[in-house]
Image (tube, grey):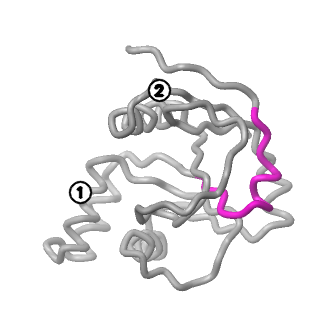
Amino acid sequence: MLVYHGSNVPVERPEIRNTNRNLDFGNGFYTTSVLEQAQRFCQIVCSRRGGSPIISVYDLDFEAAIKSLTCKVFPAADDEWFDFVCDNRMGIYQGKKYDIITGVVANDIVYRIFIGYLAGVTSREEALKQLRVRELYNQITLCTEDALKYLSFRSFEEVRDR
């Protein structure tokens, strides 16, 4: 499976880093199979940190990884996914640890839905209803060193202005 990572630098040797931000699936190396999403994300990274928008491209042997590692697949933005993402974003997730987590990622509009829910402005039912009508992209998060063994760097390219 071809996957992409958007950043402001080429990432030939991915690492699992503990971040100071609470992310959807916790700490890990985040990738996507959607090139457009990686392009958008590297633009966001560059606006925060400077540098040039760079897409790193990898081969992920997902079939082999799923057979030998602990993986969690969220097929849709459902109740289980919503709870998992909310707990991770609030920094309170205490459940099972996974080597790889894959599922939908929210775009900027959807993050506002989460913020409304977490702030108590939007009900859970309304938040899930709004999520179901939005275009959602995917993310494949490698959470352990064992997971990174299934990822092979292929190339990188600078994103050109459109």
Q: Quick check: 154 above or below 117?
A: above
Assess disc 2: are there few (<14), some (14-19) or many (≥20) residues with their C-alpha within 10 Å of its C-alpha. Answer: many
Q: Which residue is mark 2?
A: 53
Q: Which residue is mark 1?
A: 112
Seen in the image, is 23 located left or right of residue 102? left
Residue range in magenta is 140-153
Question: Where's the C terminus, which quadrant?
Answer: top left
Estimate the x, y position of residue 65 in percent, counting from the top left: 81, 58
Estimate the x, y position of residue 157 in percent, counting from the top left: 60, 20
Residue drawn at x 68%, y 62% is 100
Q: Quick check: 86 above or below 24?
A: below
Residue drawn at x 36%, y 74% is 90
Disc 1 residue type (three-letter): Arg
Relative depth, front residue between 46 and 162: 46
Residue drawn at x 39%, y 53% is 106
Residue drawn at x 85%, y 64% is 67
